[in-house]
Image: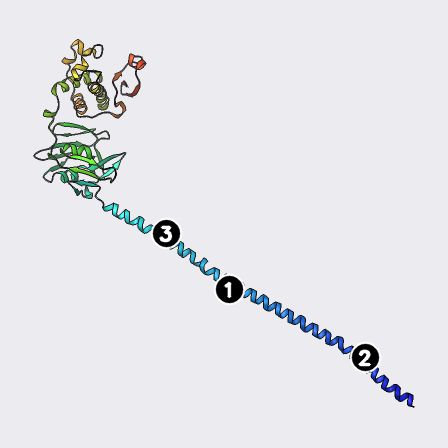
Amino acid sequence: MIRKLVSLPLCVLALLLLMGASAAPQQSDALLAEEESAALNESALETEAQVSIEEEAEEENEVPWGLRPIEVEEEPQIQEEPEEEPQEAAAVEPLLLVDGAAAPATVGRFVENGVTYVALAPMAQVLDSTVTINWDGTTATVYSDKLNLTARVGELYLVANGRYLYIPEGVRMVNNMVTVPLTTLAEAFGATLTWNGTTGVTQITRGTGGIVPGDAFYNQNDLFWLSRVIYAESGNQSLEGQMAVGNVVMNRVAHPAYPNTVEGVLAQKNQFSTYKSGALANRTPTEKCVIAAKLVLDGGEVAETDGALYFDSARSSWASRNRQYAATLGGHTFYY
């Protein structure tokens, strides 16, 4: 009986020990689960914090990036303002002055191939407010007590007080206005013209109001012989072809190797056979040849033959073999 009583407590003690051993692993597992959960929560918090930081960084980056287009748009506006101001100033800048005063925009000034053109009628009124201007549909006329000027559209010259002033591009109609080179019109009015290449300002100073008349300007002996040699050598050529022949004669007059008069040049040996035979003096030049001679005597020179000293119509000539070619104009070849 005593042995049974002793074994019973021992069994109870063993049972208790077994129960304790079984509870310990469960508690350990619970602790591990709690630690893992805590770790996961910390990781989630760190992830959320990182995302929040990155989002804040992106938001911070978006602000300056979003402002950049505004800054780029503002900068060109700041740059454009100083560019517009000079343009506005240039529009009112008096590029053409007459006795120091700005010429009105109505003169229609424009530049083409380095030549300044103006509308004839308004510019004439600026140069002399007393002029009378007429237009018959093809020819403009300008009258004053000092000037008689005619300009026919399409002609290669204008006539002022009997003087023939060469216009290589011809009298033109631009914007329904008869248009001529400014230098030519200033010369017709007896005015002087200067141009400042630094400032771009053209200055006209009024003069006599009219060019010296042709009767007083042209040397009649030079005109006599020049018009006749032009007629004899190129009477059937264009006006500029006739002028080119006259240019050769006048180039020789200006050259130190030749006589200094038209007749002296024509009289040289083996140069102009018609003069030697006496036939040249008996020629009667056409009006066109006389005009060509006056254009040349007034300084008109055809660009293609500028400086030429020889011309001929033969395919093989002394000049063609010995002189430098300049140009062919009409029925003649010209040489330097």
**Image point (16%, 13%), residue name:** 280
Q: Three-letter amino acid code at disc 1? A: Glu
Residue 315, visible in the rendered structure: no
| In this rendering, the label closer to the viewer, 1 or 3 | 1
Helix, strand or loop under label 2: helix
Q: Residue 26: give x, y in percent of width and height.
A: 74, 76
Mark 1 or mark 2, earlier in chain: 2
Callout 2 environment at 10 Å: few (<14), some (14 to 19), or many (20+)? Answer: few
Q: CA distance from mark 1 to mark 3?
A: 32 Å
| In this rendering, the label closer to the viewer, 3 or 2 | 2
Judge from the rendering whether residue 144 lies leftward or rightward of residue 13; answer left or right.
left
Q: Which mark is residue 56?
A: 1
Provide the residue designation for mark 2: 18
Task: State the residue lying farthest toward the left.
Answer: 145
Q: CA distance from mark 3 to mark 2?
A: 88 Å
Q: Residue 139: give x, y in percent of width and height.
A: 16, 33
**Image point (66%, 71%), residue name:** 37
Provide the residue designation for mark 3: 76
Q: Are marks 3 and 2 in contact (CB under 8 Å)?
A: no
Q: Which mark is residue 65?
A: none
Residue 20, visible in the rendered structure: yes
Q: Residue 103: give x, y in percent of width and height.
A: 18, 42
